[in-house]
Amino acid sequence: MYQPPWLFSRRYVHCPPLSAALESRIVQRTVATSLDSEIVASIGLGDSAAESALYEKYSGRIYFLALSELHSREDAEDVRAETFLRALQALRQNQLQLPGSLGPFLVGIALNVIRELVRRRSKTQTLDEEQLDYSADRSLESAFLDAEASRALKEAARELKPREREFLRLHYYEELPKAEIASVLGVKEERLRLIKSRTLKRFREIYQRLSDTKRPD
Amino acid sequence: MTHQQIEANEIVERYVLHQLPPEERRAFQEHYFSCDECFERTQTQARFIASAREAADSGFLVAGQSEPASSVFLFPALLRAWVVPALAAGLLVAFALIGLWALSLRRQNQQLVQQTAERSPAAEELRRSETRIRELEASGTASQEQLESLKKENSKLKEQLQAAERERETHVSQLRRSDINVPVINIFPVDEAQRGGGASAANRIRVPLGTESLVLILGDYKAGYASYRLEIRDASGRLVTRHAGLKPDQNGDLSVMLSRALLRQSKYKLSLFGRQELIAQYVIEIE
């Protein structure tokens, strides 16, 4: 993977008294902002490596945003390509006034591309676009499900009590309100939140393990 | 948007489920564009929900279900390795379940006895009256008149009880009887009904006398969901009943059987949801 030289010019001060987590968060944020400004400036100067860096950093996020909106992998690919095309055109002409706001700038372009895509396909124009759920005719599963996720969920669910599995079903599948689920299962609402976060944590661990195993290196 | 707000308001899950208002949705998108941690969490949450739905759809998340039956036959080696402990565990679970079942039956029985006593004061009254007659006859202190009046009261109570018993038996036989000649009615969404039926948006339903239940077939709904949820509200907006897990049959029809006792002569609004989204509304008018 190509890494432009300025990617390593991290201008932050290391402060020993900070906790490791806080330190890593501060470092991450400082690096993110400084890199964004540098990427924007370099693209404005015609640096093609900076364009690659822009793609490297944001392509996953743009794809995910489009997938969350449209629940279609093909459409998400199209949105990613079109968003980068428009973003690069604007950045080459130095149209971004605040280089630090590269993230919101890209979100705005991606949402515009999505709206245009939906408008082209939609037969009726009477709906309020702000309220429109673009993903309504496709399922969440078609967008985000993969073999590892499916296996990880089953492994995590096996560690649950029957009542806790029932909670997952009622919450995510039947989509019953939490108060109703709590009354059906005879547990407090706070307990439901606990079950959810515990299962999600376990799912994340198993998914990570399965994904690492799958990777060739 | 801070991490504390995101955590407290379950923003990540609500984002994935499209439950955030547009401004919050946009704010969160801008947030995860600059926050690796939230981006990673959101991706995981999306995969988690998608796989939970898939698991529920395949019956995996039903309480008590541990693994789909087919996978056992796909892995015979695994089956051999697990067969002994699995059988032992299965037997233990079965014993525990039988014990629990027996306990719950006993508890149910006690509740039924209590409910019967509560619902049938005549039976309790009769029992007391018989005890009193026996006591008075044994002690010999009661006058002939007193005994006569008590016996009259006693026979009246017996008649009341017999009438109650006859009524109960009629009820039971009605419940055992198959429901025949059930009206099956196609209903259409509000806009469809307006187009087809002129001015009125309501699907008018004339229910024949003696009908105890009716089947509604919901027409022209948006397909593409694994299951649907139906809510029925009366004219004042009060929830009459809710049915989750409606699935299309082999012809793609969604149907629901409703007890006539639930529906009076009035208008009702039926809302059909696919996941969180309202996908069709029907109005029925029972005549």
Image (cartoon, rainbow, N blue to C red):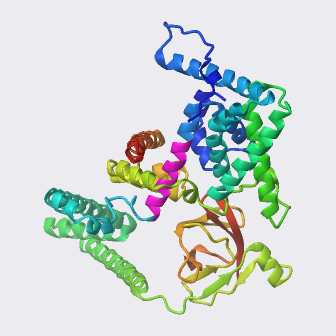
In the image, is residue B130 above or below residue A154? below
In the image, is residue A94 above or below residue A181? above
In the image, is residue A96 above or below residue A128? above
With B76 as the anchor, is B57 left or right in this view?
A: right
Q: Which residue is pictured at 58% across the width and 27% down the height? A: B4
Q: Toward the viewer: B123 or A157? A: A157
The magenta stretch spans residue B34: no
Q: Which residue is pictured at 77% across the width and 58% down the height? A: A118
All told, the count of numbered labels is: 0
Q: Toward the viewer: B14 or B267? A: B14
Q: Toward the viewer: B223 or B70? A: B70
Q: Which residue is pictured at 63% across the width and 41% down the height? A: A61
x and y percentages locating residue A165 in the rendered image: 39, 53
x and y percentages locating residue B40 in the rendered image: 54, 38
Viewport quadrant of the N terminus of chain A: top right
Viewport quadrant of the C terminus of chain A: top left
The magenta stretch spans residue B52: yes
x and y percentages locating residue A161 in the rendered image: 33, 50
Q: Which residue is pictured at 35% across the width and 82% down the height? A: B162
Q: Main secondary structure of the magenta part?
A: helix
Examine the image and state in which quarter residue B126 appears. Answer: bottom left
Q: Residue most toward the bottom?
A: B181
* Magenta segment boundaries in residue numbering: B43-57
Residue B181 in view here: yes
Q: Toward the viewer: B146 or B174? A: B174
x and y percentages locating residue B85 in the rendered image: 15, 56
